[in-house]
Image: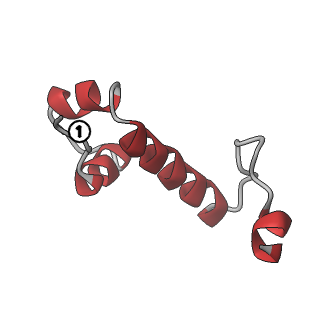
Amino acid sequence: MVKIMADKEQLSALMDGESVGQALISELEHDAEGLKSWQNYHLIGDVMRGEDPKRADWDIANSVAL
């Protein structure tokens, strides 16, 4: 079984508005780990801009306590 994993550098470039191949976008449709990275990158960006995270399951206090 071949494991599909989107290149994190390419994910970052896509978020920055840089041109990436359509293959990356297609790959993300079947790459749970890549989608998780995509979500995490957006969460990091939201926090860096001082915006409230858009994830309902985000609980910093609980994460710090762990």
**Where residue 13 appears, x then y in whole percent?**
27, 51
Is 51 left, or right, of 18 in this rendering?
Answer: right
Q: Amino acid at mark 1?
A: Ile
Provide the secondary structure element on which disc 1 rests: loop
The residue drawn where x is 63% and y is 61% is 49
Decide which of 2, 60 is in the foreground and name it. Answer: 2
The residue drawn where x is 25% and y is 30% is 27
Q: Which residue is mark 1?
A: 4
Is 7 left, or right, of 39 in this rendering?
Answer: left
Asked which quadrant contains residue 57, the reply is top right
**Where residue 39 appears, x then y in whole percent?**
52, 45
**Where residue 7 appears, x then y in whole percent?**
23, 50
- Position of the N terminus, as image quadrant, is top left
What is the crowding at mark 1: few (fewer than 14 residues within 10 Å), some, or many (at least 20)?
few
**Where residue 32 appears, x then y in whole percent?**
41, 37
The residue drawn where x is 44% and y is 45% is 38
